Image: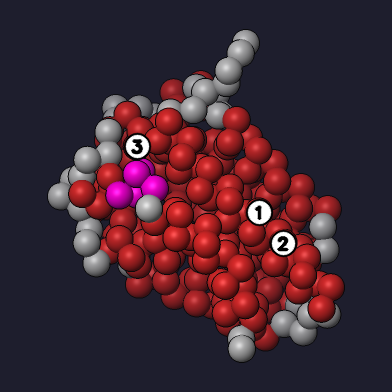
Amino acid sequence: MRFRDELWRAMDGVYRQILRHPFLEGLTDGSLPREAFRHYVMQEAHFLPDYARALAACAARSPHPQAVHRFAADAARTVEVEHSLVVELLAAFGLDEVEALKSPAAPTTVGYASYLVRTCSLGTFPEALGAIVPCYWIYARVGEKLLAESSPDPLYAWWIETYGGEDYQDTVAGVLDLLDDLSLSAEERERLLERAVTTARFEWMFWDAAWCQESWPCG
């Protein structure tokens, strides 16, 4: 069994719950309230800079030159490509990034971003990898699954095509090849899997927070 298969088996239960979430079901049938998607995009504006920092920290933790190059390049890609998508989606709501960032990061956004940055900055390389890989892979699997159905809403179809498209799928395939090539001890594998399941749960929580339009309960 490839290590990627063991990793997916650990995350599969969470992934199945993600696919059944009303946020993603609403994306494909077009019933998702625009305000829920607007909340998601605004929180992405907060989240992506820290995601890029986590990728850069993962590159810095790696003892393998190939992984250094991979994650450093993907940190730059996040800033250039995914950030550009968020800016364009915000514009579809009549917002610019400065306006979006005036709205506070929601509790789930703060928790997820903090977990990634802390794990990738202070953990071992396998722990950092465990925290990062689900961010890639779950989006790729969700995008691939949703692409077959797309959406009658052009804004939602645009988002689906970004993550279901060939370019993003190729990026994720490269990360998974790197993962399979690593030599890890049993303890390192266990820690990687534990971090991955936590990140997968945060992925579900991030979509759920958008669906509920989560805000701080006090203050």
Quarter of the image with the N terminus in it: bottom right
Circle 1: residue type: Thr
Q: What residue appears at the point 22 percent right and 58 percent down from the top-left corner?
A: 150
Q: Are marks 2 and 1 in contact (CB under 8 Å)?
A: yes
Q: Residues within 10 Å of mark 3 (few under 14, many from 20)?
A: many
Q: In this orientation, which residue lies closer to the viewer: 121 or 191?
A: 191
Q: Which residue appears farthest toward the bottom when viewing the image?
A: 1
Q: In this orientation, which residue lies closer to the viewer: 85 or 41?
A: 41
Q: What residue appears at the point 76 percent right and 47 percent down from the top-left corner?
A: 118
Image x and y of residue 46, in percent: 54, 36
Q: What kind of element bears circle 1?
A: helix
Circle 2: residue type: Glu
Q: Are marks 2 and 3 in contact (CB under 8 Å)?
A: no
Image x and y of residue 31, in percent: 22, 40
Quarter of the image with the C terminus in it: top right
Q: What kind of element bears circle 2?
A: helix
Q: What residue appears at the point 38 percent right and 53 percent down from the top-left corner?
A: 20
| Residue 53 on the magenta span | no
Q: What residue appears at the point 20 percent right and 45 percent down from the top-left corner?
A: 30
Mark with earlier residue (3, 1) = 3
Q: Which residue carries the number 1 mark?
A: 198
Image x and y of residue 134, in percent: 57, 62
| Residue 23 on the magenta span | yes
Figure disc tally? 3
Q: Which residue carries the number 2 mark?
A: 194
Is residue 175 visible to us here? no
Q: Which residue carries the number 3 mark?
A: 37
**Residue depth check, mark 3 versus mark 1: number of the one nearer the observer:** 1
Magenta segment, which residues? 21-25
Q: Is residue 175 above or below residue 21?
A: below
